[in-house]
Image (spheres, rainbow, N blue to C red):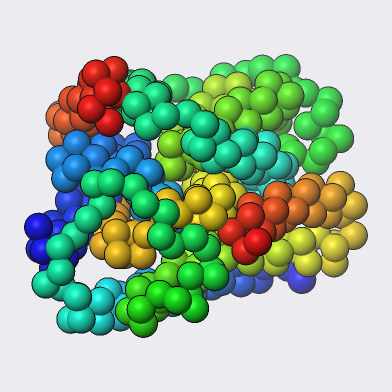
């Protein structure tokens, strides 16, 4: 695979991730405002009510849709790193395969803390 | 305040913060948090969670545009991301033990330094002794100029790597992209040309922020109702700001914005010291 094709694919991956995430968050946001726009906003005191992807199951529809958008956003750089890993493996670049595996491991650990 | 009004106000100030962040080169994430906490009374942890999410959006959006130009050094980025992601995970874990007022003080200091740093002229990388480690790691790169491809060599790899751990630590600790520190590490320490440093930094910010975001999610810092207007606003504002950056080159304007950010930083510092945050 040429470097330029690789760069184009990474660019498209990032654009798609951000676009999809913004679209999901925006639709969820409109729905959220239509349903509970008259309620009172309370962000002045911290209460950890939404903890990770597991919250998708119990959150009301609009908030779950926004959270899905945020999860797509967080997954976008992770997908970019996974994509780089494939490229380095194909190039048989052993040093950078190891580097990329390390970065991916740290990312998966961090996201893992939200899953379990 | 009702949810509708609050969301509209948050969207408006986030758009402005994203715009200011892009124009000053500070990044939207570091500007939006003090605005949310000081002006709107949002809890610092919620503000940090929303800001960190917006950092991923702006970084990925900008990187998508830069990646094809051939300035960013993918190998330097990936190698240094080992340090920034580890730092981000450590920083995000530290938010559980450091009280909010302590975080506010660190935030104020970092913001003050960044505002001061953004007003200075762009420094040159200078000629330094190439690091043999850079050759072994295949870090030396090239970028296109009007006169053809320019090659450069990377120096002080270990010092740059350590500095990147610090940049990642602050990213996870404060919910910011810490792009300024990343650029300092690459441009001033490792001697990477400025344009390559800034685009590679942008490339790295999203991955660093994602490493902190997983832990922020597990701690409940990322609330959908707040993160939605912040993320959409900062993204829209910084896209507009990046365009404005290309057309307006007024140094006075940048100084005024830096002063505004400096005032926010002092306010943040003061709130932390007096325990109001």
Q: Which of A17 and B251 is in front in this view?
A: A17
Q: Residue at x 68, y 21 (%)?
A: B159
Above or below for B234 versus A73: above
Whether residue A74 is visible: yes
Whether residue B61 is visible: no
Above or below for A100 versus B95: below
Describe residue B169's horizontal placement relative to residue A94 as left or right. Answer: left
In the rendered image, the quadrant that contains the N terminus of chain A is bottom right
Q: Position of residue A63 (x, y in %)?
A: 35, 73
Above or below for B11 versus A68: above
Describe residue B275's horizontal placement relative to residue A103 as left or right. Answer: left
Q: Residue at x 37, y 59 (%)?
A: B223
The total number of labels drawn is 0
Q: Which of B122 and B26 is in front in this view?
A: B26
Q: Quadrant of residue B258?
A: top left
Q: Quadrant of residue B268?
A: top left
Describe residue B204's horizontal placement relative to residue A23 as left or right. Answer: right
Q: Nearer the viewer, residue B259 or A22?
A: A22
Q: Where is residue B84 in the image (x, y as percent from the top left)?
A: 62, 39
Q: Which residue is drawn at 17% across and 30% down?
A: B260
In the rendered image, the quadrant that contains the C terminus of chain A is bottom right
Q: Where is residue B18 in the image (x, y as percent from the top left)?
A: 27, 50
Describe residue B115's horizontal placement relative to residue A95 as left or right. Answer: left
Q: Position of residue B28 (x, y in %)?
A: 32, 46
Q: Residue at x 52, y 31 (%)?
A: B97
């Amino acid at each position: 695979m040429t470097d330029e094709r690789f760069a184009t694919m990474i660019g498209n991956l990032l654009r798609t991730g951000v676009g999809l995430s913004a679209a999901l968050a925006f639709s969820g946001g409109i729905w959220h405002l239509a349903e509970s726009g008259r309620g009172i906003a309370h962000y002045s005191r911290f209460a950890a009510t939404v903890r990770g992807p597991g919250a998708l199951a119990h959150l009301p529809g609009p908030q779950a849709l926004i959270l899905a958008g945020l999860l797509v956003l967080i997954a976008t750089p992770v997908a970019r790193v996974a994509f780089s890993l494939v490229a380095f493996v194909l190039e048989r670049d052993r040093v950078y395969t190891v580097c990329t595996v390390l970065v991916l491991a740290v990312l998966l650990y961090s996201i893992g803390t939200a899953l379990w | 305040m009702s949810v509708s009004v609050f969301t509209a106000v948050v969207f408006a100030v986030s758009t402005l913060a994203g715009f200011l962040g892009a124009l000053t080169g500070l990044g939207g994430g570091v500007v939006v948090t003090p605005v949310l906490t000081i002006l709107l009374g949002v809890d610092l942890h919620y503000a940090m969670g929303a800001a960190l999410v917006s950092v991923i959006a702006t970084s990925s959006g900008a990187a998508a545009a830069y990646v094809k130009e051939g300035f960013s050094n993918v190998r330097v980025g990936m190698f240094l991301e080992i340090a920034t992601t580890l730092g981000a995970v450590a920083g995000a874990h530290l938010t559980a033990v450091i009280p909010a007022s302590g975080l506010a003080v660190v935030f104020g200091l970092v913001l003050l330094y960044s505002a001061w740093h953004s007003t200075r002229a762009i420094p040159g990388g200078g000629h330094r002794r190439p690091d043999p480690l850079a050759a072994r790691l295949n870090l030396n790169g090239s970028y296109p100029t009007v006169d053809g491809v320019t090659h450069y060599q990377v120096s002080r790899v270990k010092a740059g790597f350590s500095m990147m751990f610090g940049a990642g630590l602050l990213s996870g600790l404060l919910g910011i992209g810490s792009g300024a520190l990343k650029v300092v590490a690459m441009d001033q320490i490792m001697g990477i040309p400025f344009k390559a440093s800034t685009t590679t930094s942008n490339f790295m910010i999203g991955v660093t922020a994602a490493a902190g975001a997983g832990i922020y999610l597990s701690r409940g810092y990322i609330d959908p109702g707040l993160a939605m207007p912040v993320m959409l606003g900062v993204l829209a504002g910084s896209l507009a700001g990046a365009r404005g950056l290309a057309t307006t080159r007024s140094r006075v304007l940048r100084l005024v914005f830096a002063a505004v950010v400096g005032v926010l930083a002092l306010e943040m510092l003061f709130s932390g010291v007096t325990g109001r945050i």
